[in-house]
Image: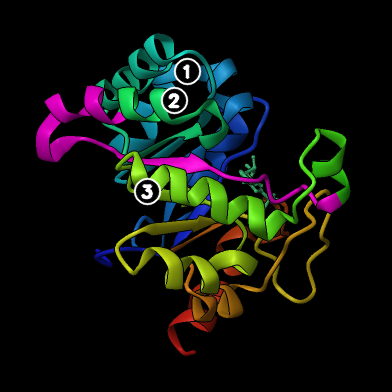
Amino acid sequence: MQKDPKIIVALDFPSEEPALALVDSLNPELCRLKVGKELFTRSGPALVKALQSRGFEVFLDLKFHDIPNTTSAAVAAAADLGVWMVNVHASGGARMMEACRERLESFGADRPLLIAVTVLTSMGADDLRGIGVTVSPAEQVSRLAALTAECGLDGVVCSAQEAPVLKQERGDRFTLVTPGIRPLTAAKGDQQRVMTPVDALAAGSDYLVIGRPITQADDPLAALEAIHREIVSR
Ligand SMILES: O=c1ccn([C@@H]2O[C@H](COP(=O)(O)O)[C@@H](O)[C@H]2O)c(=O)[nH]1
């Protein structure tokens, strides 16, 4: 198996059947899988287990955002599921993030990576102003990444556009997980802060979260392989 596949395919499906039909055409050597709110709410832990039994590592993308007691219990439940990565919202604050990190310590080396969402890649400056944040998305991402690092988490979800600055500010060991990845010909859809796969890796992204450009392609495996070829030959 490729040691550390860079592509994480976002399984945004309404039920287990189409998700597993797609997954059965994919190759765990080329990608990990992300289970988000829609699919987990429909199909739950059994679906995560089904993906793991097929050889895939799973990023449980439930973006927990709650009081410290509730959120830390939720990340522990994710760790019990054996997922590779789990996340919370950095805007839940330092006490919440610290509680999550501390709660995962008991899982030792088997604990999932714990990362924090900074500013959603669907948001631009206008959206931030709408929620009372008057700095640019890049500034807000840097601010929340600094807080995340202080709390001892493994990294953040951000857009690849912020990756060069974050690598400079936080160093190589701070993991950057970047959705909003769009091959040149792909539709942006609801994403605002986007970058191509090759440019994102060059900018410093550690993992590329890619949903619709693969899952909605006529031939998802061909789409995944094409992106994989592009990034390994860069
Ligand atoms: O800031 C964020 C955080 C999470 N996501 C998730 O990533 C995928 C992206 O899917 P695409 O189809 O490639 O747009 C999706 O599951 C989001 O929930 C994000 O886009 N931005």
The magenta-colored residue range is 101-125
Whether residue 57 appears in this view of the structure is no
Q: Residues within 10 Å of mark 1 (few under 14, many from 20)?
A: some
Residue 156 in the image: above or below residue 111: below
Q: In the rendered structure, are the residues bearing label 1 and label 2 in contact, judged by CB atoms less than 8 Å apart?
A: yes
Q: Which mark is residue 47?
A: 2
At 51% across and 36% down in the image, what residue appears?
90
User: With 18 as the anchor, is 167 left or right in this view?
Assistant: left
Query: Helix, strand, or loop for circle 1?
Result: helix
Query: Helix, strand, or loop for circle 3?
Result: helix
Q: CA separation, marks 1 and 3? A: 30 Å
At 27% across and 26% down in the image, what residue appears?
79
User: With 13 as the anchor, is 89 left or right in this view?
Assistant: left
Residue 117: x %, y % from top left = 54, 41
For mark 1, what is the residue?
44
The image shows a total of numbered marks equal to 3
Q: In the rendered structure, are the residues bearing label 2 and label 3 in contact, judged by CB atoms less than 8 Å apart?
A: no
Residue 159 in the image: above or below residue 143: below
Q: Which mark is residue 149?
A: 3
Q: Farthest top residue?
A: 69
Residue 149 in the image: above or below residue 176: above
Nearer to the camera, 86 or 118: 118
Nearer to the camera, 32 or 84: 84
Residue 140: x %, y % from top left = 64, 50
